[in-house]
Amino acid sequence: MLVFKDPRGTQVFSKHIGPDEQDRGKTVYMTQTQGEHRICVQCKGSKWFQTTALKWELSIDLGDTEFSRTPATRGDIRGIERTAMATLARAEAIAAENE
Protein backbone atom coordinates (compact mmCIF):
# COMPACT_ATOMS: atom_id res chain seq x y z
CA MET A 1 0.00 0.00 0.00
CA LEU A 2 1.30 3.45 -0.90
CA VAL A 3 0.05 6.31 1.26
CA PHE A 4 0.60 9.92 0.23
CA LYS A 5 0.56 12.57 2.97
CA ASP A 6 0.43 16.34 2.65
CA PRO A 7 2.65 18.78 4.61
CA ARG A 8 0.27 18.59 7.61
CA GLY A 9 0.66 14.79 7.72
CA THR A 10 -2.89 14.19 6.51
CA GLN A 11 -3.41 11.22 4.19
CA VAL A 12 -4.51 12.60 0.83
CA PHE A 13 -4.22 9.53 -1.41
CA SER A 14 -3.56 5.81 -1.11
CA LYS A 15 -3.28 2.89 -3.50
CA HIS A 16 -2.77 -0.85 -3.09
CA ILE A 17 0.37 -1.93 -4.96
CA GLY A 18 1.20 -5.55 -5.64
CA PRO A 19 2.49 -7.95 -8.28
CA ASP A 20 -1.07 -9.02 -9.11
CA GLU A 21 -2.32 -5.50 -9.85
CA GLN A 22 -3.46 -4.64 -13.37
CA ASP A 23 -1.43 -1.38 -13.44
CA ARG A 24 1.72 -3.31 -12.52
CA GLY A 25 2.36 -1.14 -9.49
CA LYS A 26 2.22 2.28 -11.11
CA THR A 27 0.54 5.23 -9.50
CA VAL A 28 0.42 8.98 -10.00
CA TYR A 29 -0.52 11.75 -7.61
CA MET A 30 -0.53 15.50 -8.26
CA THR A 31 -0.30 17.59 -5.13
CA GLN A 32 -2.98 20.13 -4.33
CA THR A 33 -0.89 22.13 -1.85
CA GLN A 34 2.69 23.36 -1.68
CA GLY A 35 5.21 21.94 0.74
CA GLU A 36 6.95 18.71 1.68
CA HIS A 37 4.84 15.65 0.95
CA ARG A 38 5.56 12.11 2.14
CA ILE A 39 5.07 8.78 0.43
CA CYS A 40 4.77 5.92 2.90
CA VAL A 41 5.13 2.28 1.92
CA GLN A 42 2.99 0.07 4.15
CA CYS A 43 3.64 -3.68 4.03
CA LYS A 44 1.16 -5.91 5.81
CA GLY A 45 2.23 -9.10 7.50
CA SER A 46 4.15 -10.18 10.55
CA LYS A 47 7.45 -10.63 8.71
CA TRP A 48 9.27 -8.25 6.38
CA PHE A 49 9.82 -10.82 3.67
CA GLN A 50 6.76 -13.01 4.16
CA THR A 51 5.83 -13.08 0.47
CA THR A 52 7.53 -12.67 -2.87
CA ALA A 53 10.02 -9.81 -2.88
CA LEU A 54 8.88 -6.68 -4.70
CA LYS A 55 11.20 -4.42 -6.65
CA TRP A 56 10.54 -0.72 -6.07
CA GLU A 57 11.39 2.08 -8.45
CA LEU A 58 10.69 5.71 -7.59
CA SER A 59 10.31 8.30 -10.30
CA ILE A 60 9.55 11.91 -9.42
CA ASP A 61 8.43 14.41 -12.02
CA LEU A 62 8.59 17.98 -10.86
CA GLY A 63 6.28 20.48 -12.37
CA ASP A 64 3.53 22.89 -11.63
CA THR A 65 0.49 24.32 -13.26
CA GLU A 66 1.73 27.76 -12.26
CA PHE A 67 5.17 29.35 -12.37
CA SER A 68 7.11 28.67 -9.19
CA ARG A 69 9.41 31.34 -7.80
CA THR A 70 11.34 28.69 -5.88
CA PRO A 71 11.60 25.52 -8.00
CA ALA A 72 13.23 22.41 -6.57
CA THR A 73 16.99 22.50 -6.81
CA ARG A 74 19.46 19.74 -7.58
CA GLY A 75 20.30 19.73 -3.87
CA ASP A 76 16.65 19.06 -3.00
CA ILE A 77 16.58 16.07 -5.33
CA ARG A 78 19.88 14.78 -3.94
CA GLY A 79 18.39 15.01 -0.46
CA ILE A 80 15.52 12.80 -1.59
CA GLU A 81 18.01 10.40 -3.16
CA ARG A 82 20.02 10.19 0.09
CA THR A 83 16.86 9.47 2.07
CA ALA A 84 15.81 6.74 -0.38
CA MET A 85 19.28 5.16 -0.26
CA ALA A 86 19.28 5.23 3.56
CA THR A 87 15.87 3.56 3.58
CA LEU A 88 17.12 0.88 1.19
CA ALA A 89 20.21 0.27 3.35
CA ARG A 90 18.01 -0.12 6.43
CA ALA A 91 15.72 -2.58 4.63
CA GLU A 92 18.77 -4.62 3.56
CA ALA A 93 20.06 -4.61 7.15
CA ILE A 94 16.71 -5.87 8.42
CA ALA A 95 16.71 -8.58 5.74
CA ALA A 96 20.19 -9.66 6.81
CA GLU A 97 19.07 -9.85 10.45
CA ASN A 98 16.12 -12.08 9.49
CA GLU A 99 18.25 -14.58 7.56
Image (cartoon, grey):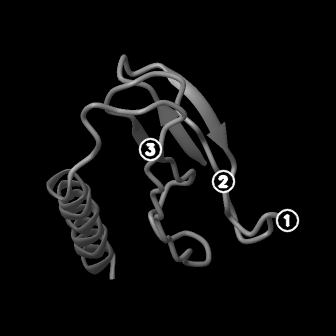
Front label number (2 vs 1): 2
Q: Residues within 10 Å of mark 1 (few under 14, many from 20)?
A: few
Q: Residue at x 69, y 49 (%)?
A: 16
Determine whether the residue tagged by mark 1 lies in a helix, strand or loop: loop
Q: In the image, what residue type sits under mark 1? A: Gln
Of labels 2 and 1, earlier in sequence is 1
> Residue 38 occupies which quadrant of the picture?
top left
Which callout, 1 or 3, points at the residue further toward the start of the chain?
A: 1
Residue corresponding to mark 3: 40
Query: Observer-nearest residue: 6 or 90?
Result: 6
Q: Is residue 33 above or below residue 48?
A: above
Residue plotted at (55% across, 69% down): 50
Q: Residues within 10 Å of mark 2 (few under 14, many from 20)?
A: few
* SS of the residue under disc 3: strand
- How packed is label 3: few (under 14 Cα within 10 Å), some, or many (20 or more)? few
Q: Which residue is denoted by mark 1 in the rendering?
A: 22
Mark pair 2, 1: CA separation? 11 Å
In this rendering, which labeled residue sits more in front, label 3 or label 2?
2
Q: Is residue 66 left or right of residue 79?
A: right
Number of numbered discs on residues: 3
Under mark 3, the amino acid is Cys
Q: Residue 44, position in %: x, y?
A: 57, 50
Q: Earlier in the sequence, mark 3 or mark 2?
A: 2
Residue that carries the numbered disc 2 in the rendered image:
27
What distance separates the C-alpha of mark 1 from that of mark 3? 21 Å
